[in-house]
Image: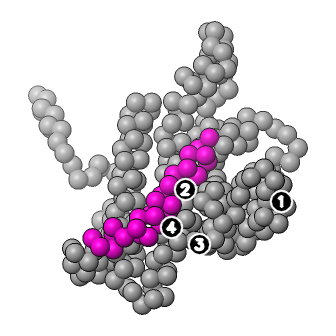
Amino acid sequence: MTTAPAKAGWRFRQPSVIPGFGLTLGFSLAYLTLIILIPLSGLIWRSAALGWTDFWAIATDRRTINALQISFGTAFIAAAVNVVFGTIVAWVLVRYNFPGRRIVDAMVDLPFALPTAVAGIALTTLYAPNGWLGSLLAPLGIKVAYTPLGIVIALIFIGLPFVVRTVQPIMEEIDKEVEEVAATLGANRFQTIARVLLPGLAPAIVTGFALAFARGVGEYGSVIFIAGNLPYKSEIAPLLIVIRLEEYNYAAATAIAAIMLALSFMMLLVINLVQTWSRKRYG
């Protein structure tokens, strides 16, 4: 006599031989509550105390809008550039052996260890009108320092490791035989990259883009030196928050921070949905 198998239904967790689910889940929720949820709740509560009229007046202020446009626009451009060149750097490090490869690999992590203020000072020194690179670009009519272009370069510098270190492990798992098989089937190099390699790397590339974008939106130290901090031209939203705090205008500071939080959440939500779709499609 055989018993009928139990009907499969939704379960809160899958059976596991590893104990401690309840303890680790409780610790995780408590940690996230203390570190993330409570501070964010305080920010939202302080912003809600303004009232809709005052909050809308701060949100629609021309200086606030320009600062948000510069922060999100430059972060998006820098993340897009890092997706292209970060993927190329990861490809070179994985597929080629050359003298100094370990040094180049270690240099990728330099923005992680370097204080952001030091990076900002170094980039400003290089790209200022009298700097090494700025003096060469000035005769061509290209001004980098104290412009949004300088902000983009600073964000490219600090965001590159996020793309490289996200794509590199996935690229190492792709066997060279896959490329060779595609070549034997008549695919040229472009078709091999577009139809064989990129679909498998798409989830990692999207993740790297999201990490670089999120870091760029909230970056402060490496940007304030090279940006010039000119209102309506090169002033970023984090700097505007600091300015409002120095003016003891805590209501405006929390309102701008809440707007940045909402916009960042929506954009990261869209990116995560795209990432989920790419994983389901390409595996």
Report whether residue 236 is seen: no
Q: Quadrant of the N terminus?
A: top left
Q: Which residues are magenta?
A: 56-84
Q: Main secondary structure of the magenta part?
A: helix
Which residue is drawn at the image coordinates 12% and 32% (left, top)?
A: 4
- How many residues crowd around disc 1 within 10 Å: few (fewer than 14), some, or many (20 or more)? some
Which residue is drawn at the image coordinates 44% and 32% (left, top)?
A: 283
Quarter where residue 99 is shown: top right
Query: Which of the two discs, 2 and 1, labels the residue nearer the N terminus?
Result: 2
Q: Which mark is residue 135?
A: 1
Above or below, comparing residue 212 to residue 90 in the picture: below
- How many residues crowd around disc 4 within 10 Å: few (fewer than 14), some, or many (20 or more)? some
Amino acid type at mark 1? Ser
Q: Which residue is mark 2?
A: 74
For this rendering, which residue is in front, 5 or 90?
Answer: 90
Q: Which residue is mark 4?
A: 232
Query: Which of the two discs, 3 and 1, labels the residue nearer the N terminus?
Result: 1
Q: Is residue 222 left or right of residue 18?
A: right
Q: Nearer the viewer, mark 2 or mark 1?
A: 1
